[in-house]
Amino acid sequence: MILYDNLEGLGSILQLYGSVVYGLIPMCTLMALISWLWLFAYDALDDVLLMAEANPFALAAIGAVTSIAVVWRTNLAWSRYWEACTQTAFMHSKWTDSYAQLISFIAYAMDNLYGDKSPEAVKKREKLAQIRFSLAHSYSVLSALVAHRLTRGDLARMRKRAEAMGMASTRI
């Protein structure tokens, strides 16, 4: 999984490792050179230009393939995002189900001990009340940690990677 630091800003664009910007610079330079040569060779290639103007299939094919590729990747990213949202909601639903089931068992056990005034029954009711409070606290903390992890990411791992690449930041 690719980890991104959303607070990095321009640093994530200008980083050397894993960036496509520096890989595209030679290609962009080559394309600029070809365009510059094309401009000066325009008069010498009148016959070729007339053929390209008469049948612009090559340019239309490149444009169509590029458009399909961009739409395909955008659709794939959108689908992955919504799949993650669906799975997160499913996970929270299962946690809610397990919490409700545990609390119902505790409530049933406490109801069975309701009329009993013996010290053992009182001790069991107190222990069950303590377990119920502990479960509520644990599930709340678990939910908060998951929500924080999903919204903020694994910052410790990203900090180690940034330090290894020489991009130490105080905001991570």
Image (tube, rainbow, N blue to C red):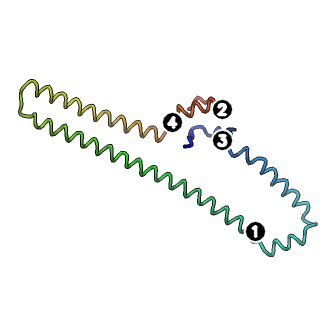
Counting residues from the N terminus, which is met first, the one under dot 2 or under dot 1?
Answer: 1
The residue wearing badge 3 is: 18
The residue wearing badge 2 is: 165
Amino acid on which the number 1 mark rests in the picture: Ala
Mark 3 surroundings within 10 Å by alpha-carbon count, few (fewer than 14), some (14 through 19), many (20 or more): few
Counting residues from the N terminus, which is met first, the one under dot 4 or under dot 2?
Answer: 4
Q: Quadrant of the N terminus?
A: top right
- Looking at the rendered structure, the secondary structure element under dot 3 is loop
Marks 1/3: CA–CA distance: 32 Å
Counting residues from the N terminus, which is met first, the one under dot 2 or under dot 3?
Answer: 3
Q: Is residue 20 left or right of residue 101?
A: right
Residue positioned 19% across, 37% down in the render: 106
The residue wearing badge 4 is: 154
The residue wearing badge 1 is: 58
Amino acid on which the number 3 mark rests in the picture: Gly
Q: Position of residue 67 (x, y in %)?
A: 65, 62
Counting residues from the N terminus, which is met first, the one under dot 4 or under dot 3?
Answer: 3
Residue 19 occupies which quadrant of the picture? Answer: top right
Residue positioned 20% across, 41% down in the render: 104
- Looking at the rendered structure, the secondary structure element under dot 4 is loop
Q: Quadrant of the C terminus?
A: top right
Counting residues from the N terminus, which is met first, the one under dot 1 or under dot 4?
Answer: 1
Marks 4/3: CA–CA distance: 18 Å
Marks 1/4: CA–CA distance: 45 Å
Tell me whether circle 2 and circle 1 mark residues in contact (CB < 8 Å). no
